[in-house]
Image: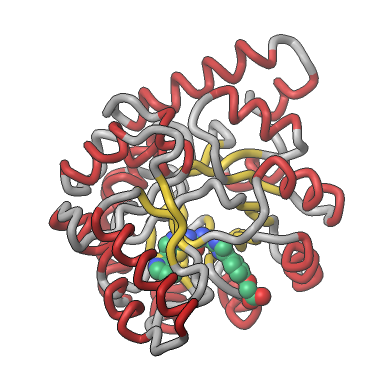
Amino acid sequence: MDALMTRIGVQYPIFQGGMAWVADGQLAAAVSAAGGLGIIGSGHAPASYVAEQIAIAKARTDKPFGVNVMLLSPFVEEVIAVIAEAGVAVVTTGAGDPGRYLGTLQAAGSVVLPVVPSVALAKRMARLGVDGVIAEGMESGGHIGAMTTMALVPQVVDAIDIPVVAAGGIADGRGVAAALALGASGVQMGTRFLAASETQIHPQYQAAVLKAKDVDTLVTGQYIGHAARVLKNPMSRQYLKLEKQLAINGGDMTAVEQLGNGSLRIAVKEGDPQRGSFMAGQAAGMVHAVTPAAEILQSLVAQTLTLLGDGPLRAKVV
Ligand code: TUI
């Protein structure tokens, strides 16, 4: 096991992505209890929600877990305060530069791992003194950059000398082994954990993930600067159509943005394909069954170790 993973205290170098509204205290605790790193997603939720989910996770496991801070949230400051107060083992950040919160979080004892979509941002983060980065490819669900995991991870690994966790397009042991071969210290998976039995997402959301094939996601928001990968459904097709029309003809994008507002929460809570954005990555086509988080981790680790054999990468897993 790599030094970062030993420091965090996980048994396996496998993180569950901090998906907004999806990754609650119950899911994160299940993943952490099974030896991975469960991560609570803060998204746009108020600090009180984050505090509740941290309490739920703490009540269910003594193992380390993480919290993801979505830096576009209007509640960032309060969420950071709650995390620092609670003493959370790992803080991952998304959708921006966490520089101004780094001192507070590290002083509170958290290992801070920003998600980076490019080498430039990875270098900036390394200079700031973060503990590692999560290099996330555009195969991922939700908000994404422009690079693929296969091309991004080795370039980030070469550019910085702190640990790199790979994310995007990984859903089984083949992906884990590949990420370790690219130089990653571990992996983060979101989509695979949408099919964990401990998630409390709407059954129609989970069913849509299980049904999805390789080409069943699309990217919305490219024209307004917030690209997000979601499952194809009436909502996302309509959104993309409107967005393209406005981009070609010129016009006010606020109407489109309003269509997107709250649509992730609608997907998670109501499962409505007419109004909900079902965020999921391209790896959805590899997710076939709902199983407990512990079984997901066991099968990931078993498959990875079989593939790695007695080779030098084995030491990164056990
Ligand atoms: O954050 C994510 N994934 C997310 S956040 C989210 S909530 C949301 N909903 C609608 C629109 C926007 C967000 C759903 N999924 N992943 C981590 C991630 N971070 N991906 C890409 C980035 C990123 C992008 C730019 C990180 C830093 C960054 O820096 C820009 C700069 O230079 O500051």
Q: Which quarter of the rendering shows the N terminus?
A: top right
Quick check: 236 left or right of 155? left
Quick check: 252 left or right of 312? left
Residue 65, image x and y in percent? 44, 50
6 versus 173 height, above or below? below
Farthest residue to the bottom: give it: 252
170 versus 29 height, above or below? above
Residue 311, image x and y in percent? 77, 15
Q: Please name whichever residue, 292 or 243, is drawn nearer the observer in this view of the structure.
A: 243
Quick check: 317 left or right of 193? right
Residue 3, image x and y in percent? 72, 42
Q: Residue at x 56, y 45 (%)?
A: 168
Residue 138, image x and y in percent? 58, 52
47 versus 53 height, above or below? below
Q: Residue at x 70, y 29 (%)?
A: 316
Q: Does any portion of residue 120 appear in the rendered image?
A: yes
